[in-house]
Amino acid sequence: MNKQAITSHPINDLAINRWSPRAFLELPVEEHKLVSMFEAARWSASGGNEQPWRFIIGVKEDETWQKIFSTLNEGNQVWCKQAPVLLLACANMISSWDGGISPFYQYDAGQAVAHMSLEAVNQGLHLHQMGGFSGEKAAGLFGVPEGFSVLTAIAVGYLGDPGTLPDNLYERELQPRSRKPLSELVFSGNFGEAAAMIED
Ligand SMILES: Cc1cc2nc3c(=O)[nH]c(=O)nc-3n(C[C@H](O)[C@H](O)[C@H](O)COP(=O)(O)O)c2cc1C
């Protein structure tokens, strides 16, 4: 299935082809591809180079996969049962500079997952991030230490057949993707005033 971004301006092919599917092939993912995804995350930028991100990986249907699956809300379990790989994205909340809560741990971890998502496309894979899960339950199941937060769950795999999804998700899978226009996002002068270079 093709859900390439219909962009208003030219962008790179990885970003054009990245999207968040729910239908995955129940085909195992080669380990070297997953390792490359983690390597891309590792080379992401972070405030003070703190590299707060940590990941937990479960491969269908090992014990880790089952435990991550059990933390997902029902709406996500419906389609994630097809996903060959499940991840948890965690972050160290504590800044090594002053021992307080880092203002950037979520920003940094999200950025690392963004890099991972583009590397996934580079490897012929897709990933789908989820906030619909219990981070608290995941922290308990995996012995996540104090000072760390479990931020998102992530499904990874090869694009599957949308026809395998329940009707409501099948329709969502086929829906066109949409984005706010750049004029609502990029300002100059005062906040809210579209920058002159933006035409749409
Ligand atoms: C932090 C975060 C949480 C999300 N939570 C869920 C979720 O619980 N379930 C789900 O199906 N999609 C979830 N998504 C996927 C978004 O709905 C999706 O990225 C968005 O609709 C844009 O679509 P695209 O990624 O295909 O461009 C989440 C994405 C992010 C970044």
Image (cartoon, rainbow, N blue to C red):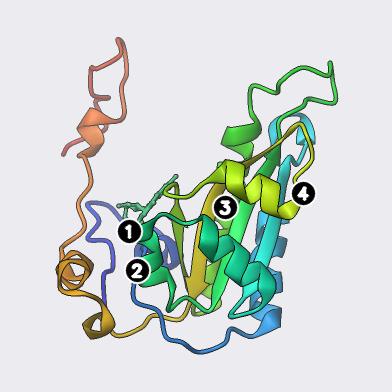
What percent of the width, then of the height, locates residue 63? 68, 73
User: Which quadrant would the C terminus be assigned to in this image?
Assistant: top left
Asked if residue 21 shows in the view, the reply is no
Q: Residues within 10 Å of mark 2 (few under 14, many from 20)?
A: some
Location of mark 1 (residue) = 75
Residue in the picture at 62% in, 50% down: 138
Q: Is the CB atom of the residue marked by disc 3 within 8 angstroms of ligand 1's nearest atom?
A: yes
Q: Is the CB atom of the residue marked by disc 1 within 8 angstroms of ligand 1's nearest atom?
A: yes
Q: Earlier in the sequence, mark 3 or mark 1?
A: 1
Tell me, for residue 78, which label it has, or none.
2
Residue 101 falls in which quadrant of the image?
top right
Distance, label 1 to label 4, CA atoms, is: 25 Å
> Which marked residue is nearer to the observer: mark 4 or mark 3?
4
Query: What type is the residue that disc 2 sits on?
Result: Val
Evaluate if marks 4 and 3 touch, with contact meaning CB atoms under 8 Å apart. Answer: no
Element type where label 2 sits in the image: helix
Query: What type is the residue that disc 3 sits on?
Result: Val
Element type where label 3 sits in the image: helix
Residue in the picture at 27% in, 61% down: 5
Residue in the picture at 31% in, 28% down: 186
Query: What type is the residue that disc 1 sits on?
Result: Gly
Q: Residues within 10 Å of mark 1 (few under 14, many from 20)?
A: few
Distance, label 1 to label 2, CA atoms, is: 6 Å
Q: Specify whether 123 is left or right of 190.
A: right
Distance, label 3 to label 1, CA atoms, is: 22 Å
